[in-house]
Image: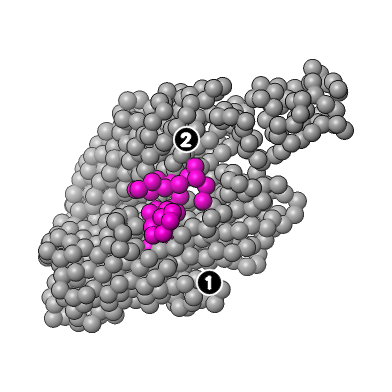
Amino acid sequence: MGYLGRRIGLSQDNGDSNPGAAGGAVGGGILDLFAHGYFERQGDLYNAPGIPIPPGPLGLTATGGVISDYTDPGSGNVYRAHVFTSSGALDVTAHSASLPNTVDYLIIGGGGGGGGTIGGGGGAGALKYATSQPLPVAPHPITVGAGGAGGGFPTPNASVAGSDSTAFSVTAAGGGAGGTGEVNGGAGGSGGGAGYGQPAGGTGSGDGSHPGGIDQASPPNGWGYNGGISPGPAGSNPGGAGGGGGAAANGAAAVYVPHNSPGTVGGPGGSGARYTIANGTATYYAGGGGGGNQGPLGNGGGTGGAGGGGAGIKGSPVPGTPGTPGTGGGGGGGGYDPTGGLGGTGGSGTVVVRYQIGTIAVAKATGGLISFYGDKTIHTFTNSGTFDNTTPSALNVTYFIVGGGAGAGGGHGGGGGAGGVKTGPLSIPTAAVTVTVGSGGAGGLIYGFPQSKGTNGGDSSITTPAPTVLARGGGGGGGGGYDPGVPAPAANAGSQIPNSDSHTIGGSGGGGAGQRPSAPGGAGEGSSGSYPGGDNGGGPAAGGGGGAGGAGVDSPGGAVGGNGGVGVQIPTTFQNPASAPGSDGGGLGYPGPGSPGIYWVAGGGGGGAGSGGTVGRGGGPGPAPYAGAGPGAATTGGDGLFGKTNSGSGGGGAGGGPNGTFGGSGGSGIVLIAYDTV
């Protein structure tokens, strides 16, 4: 026996470092007093770095969401977080015999959509945070609120408030909608910013007294502030709109200058609040969207609030910046252009649950959400960030990248195409490399306007000195037209992604629009693994968007929308059972075909149908959310459903109706990186 500072165990020469070693001979080598005491109290944990092998349930036993294991730098405690970017369930199957059976949780509602036509920024979802909450053994449903759609042109096409998020009988309200045109901001968890020339921002239902700092427990109503005002008189030129409220600050008022004088600025969105619950790093959540601005003399749109708020836009038909998915950030307000101004979509909310575990969580790199499965360490990026190899040599990894899904068309709109998928080996140097997660494209608006076509999804990538790995975003679904006799202009056919190098799998094409004779689906990016969208059938229904695993289905004619193309399954390397998706998602991937029919992503959105038609299913023939894709709408005036966050799937096409139907936005992409733990 060796002895050092009351450390009892075999000497370095004789110690056995295998789990379950005879005679309690775990370890060997010198441990500091705290570390050795920790190992001994936990029943001789195997101390090989990075391998989580507890001899029993040292923390709660639970599944659901994306797993993140980390050591809290302040307390030294090792935690497991379950991060939900879509609805699902946290299934607690056993309590711990040695650690607290309580959880900390963060619940954030979906962000409000930014207003169109010099619109106010969307308000952030309300934020609720609590610690040391008892949790019984049972499945606990989790609802993650979607972000609201941005407002459009003309002015009556109002933006939409974010949806509520709910967990453990606690609800965080969705953010208020930004005021579209000369309309006040809407009330919500945080209030939406006032539209052009309006004296009142929306009221936040959350508490507006955040003290600053990190990890602040929330009051009963959660954190949420008011939207900003637009002080200029209605009809002034130029003019700006107010910023949306955030979790820790009011949205700012627009800066007003006299008529025809330069200098007006849209109001910045209110700041969000910082929490370490997801991965131990202080991260902002629930920032308000920036207000839009009128050109040409304005200085610009308001900046988005820290925590995922989207920036407002100046004088352009380009939409305001969307709120960041998984943050509850408000969408940016739209600008103005003769063809209209569009608000950005609000960011979806999130639910994060963490508890202490007896796991040694040591990784060779930083970045994203880190988990351990089998003999692999897995980094999951649900939003853009940095992967930093902290070892002294190059790190050989396996990656799986999905581009952002595209938005679907409005008004008998085609389904959005899925983002491209790329997987393979990569050597990452001892350095920080940029990881980009593609955003989902915005859904199109009503008939006849250029904005009726869905927006392409954003590209996802890992940027290294050589090579850069890229997965293209999907192609937007074609926009419909109310007059069935009008041929489809090129702008309203399904999108086509330009060809790139032969080593990249590109995004799939969007579906062809309904009520547009001879409107074809868009082509895929052109290389192996990309698929075209389906054609319309010459009637009021549209084709499905292409998937990463198959082409979008043509509308068979009449009022029947085409199904979206099938997606692909995430490789088994990343299929951690603790993060398996439920029937609605809530983990890694979504339902799909085969056995087991889980861990699927990148399905095409379903085509929209006419009045009384049959809806086009999203991502294949199965029930929603098949591969996370949005089904099309089947009723007059119906809006298509969104692609799910981090699915890379396309949105569902809009149904018929002359008064405005919106295509569903595409789901954001995802990036997974795995390497050998030892």
- State whether residue 548 is above or below residue 37: below
Secondary structure under tag 1 reads loop
Residue under the image location 47 percent in, 72 percent down: 529
Give me the C-alpha separation between circle 2 and circle 1: 37 Å
Residue 244 on image: x %, y %: 32, 44
547 with respect to 14 (left or right): left
Residue count near mark 1 (Cα–Cα under 10 Å), binned few <14, some 14–19, many ≥20: many
Using the image as rendered, state which of residue 604 and residue 44 is in the foreground.
44
Q: Position of residue 62 (x, y in %)?
A: 47, 35
- What colour-coding does the image apply? one colour
Return the x and y of residue 55 as percentages of the image width and height. Answer: 62, 30
Describe residue 470's horizontal placement relative to residue 653 as left or right.
right
**Mark whose residue sits in front, 2 or 1:** 2
Where does the magenta region start and end?
A: 575-603
Is 205 or 600 nearer to us in this picture?
600
Q: Amino acid at mark 1?
A: Thr
- Residue 504: assigned label: 1
Q: Position of residue 193 (x, y in %)?
A: 28, 45
Q: Which residue is mark 2?
A: 62
Looking at the image, which residue is at 65% across and 64% down? 465
Q: Are marks 2 and 1 in contact (CB under 8 Å)?
A: no
Q: Is residue 110 magenta?
A: no
- Kind of residue at badge 2: Ala
| Image point (52%, 65%), residue name | 422
The image quadrant that residue 514 belongs to is bottom left
Which residue is found at the position 27% from the left and 60% from the top?
631
Q: Nearer the viewer, residue 576 or 245?
A: 576
Mark 2: secondary structure? strand
